[in-house]
Image (cartoon, rainbow, N blue to C red):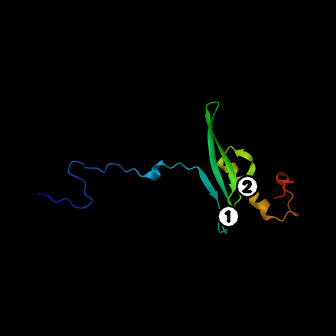
């Protein structure tokens, strides 16, 4: 008679049932835009939808500030993660510069 050791597989099963973990079902849907010396993130970029345009899958992203109340960054949707990240960087510069010195045409009259 053999004694089964703790954690050992039964003799009729030579491999584990599955190497699956719930994390395997996760799909990245947001990215955090972190300024290197900041205590908390500056913004979050969210994956919103993939649209089929003329046979090609096109991703759409939106960026929002991390701090509550969340504020939309940019004019709406971005076609790429890179474009959304660039908008986050530009918005960070805009909110970091005193309004009297800020001459950014993309933020003119927004009064943030």
Viewer-side residue, 40 vs 87: 40
Residue under pointer 2: 71
Residue under pointer 1: 35
Residue furthest out toward the front: 69
Which quarter of the rendering shows the C terminus? bottom right
Residue at 73% over, 52% down: 72
Dot 2: what SS?
A: loop
Residue at 63% over, 45% down: 48
Crowding at dot 2, Cα within 10 Å, few <14 / some 14-19 / many 20+, comes out as few
Residue 81 image position (x, y, % from top left)? 65, 49
Q: Is residue 53 above or below residue 80?
A: above
Residue 35 image position (x, y, % from top left)? 67, 64
Residue furthest out toward the left: 1
* Figure disc tally: 2
Residue furthest out toward the top: 54
Residue 65 found in image quarter: bottom right
- Relative to 112, 38 lies left or right: left
Viewer-side residue, 70 vs 9: 70
- Relative to 8, 108 lies left or right: right
Dot 1: what SS?
A: loop
Residue at 77% over, 61% down: 93
Residue 33 found in image quarter: bottom right
- Relative to 12, 59 lies left or right: right
- How far apart, in angstroms, are the residues tagged by discs 1 and 2? 17 Å
Residue 98 image position (x, y, % from top left)? 84, 65
Crowding at dot 1, Cα within 10 Å, few <14 / some 14-19 / many 20+, comes out as few
Viewer-side residue, 1 vs 35: 1
User: Do residues under tags 1 and 2 come within 8 Å of each other at their CB atoms?
Assistant: no
- Tell me the number on the disc at residue 56: none
Report the mark closest to the observer, 1 or 2: 2
Which quarter of the rendering shows the N terminus? bottom left
Q: Earlier in the sequence, mark 1 or mark 2?
A: 1
């Amino acid at each position: 008679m053999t004694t089964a050791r703790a954690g050992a597989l039964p003799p009729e099963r030579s491999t584990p049932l599955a190497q699956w973990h719930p994390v395997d079902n996760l799909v990245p849907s947001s990215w955090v835009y972190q300024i290197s010396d900041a205590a908390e993130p500056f913004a979050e970029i969210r994956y919103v939808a993939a649209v089929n345009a003329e046979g090609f899958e096109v991703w759409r992203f939106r960026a929002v500030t991390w701090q509550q109340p969340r504020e939309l960054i940019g004019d709406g949707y971005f076609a790429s993660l890179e474009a959304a990240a660039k908008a986050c960087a530009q918005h960070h510069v805009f909110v970091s510069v005193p309004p009297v010195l800020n001459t950014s045409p993309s933020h003119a009259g927004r009064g943030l």
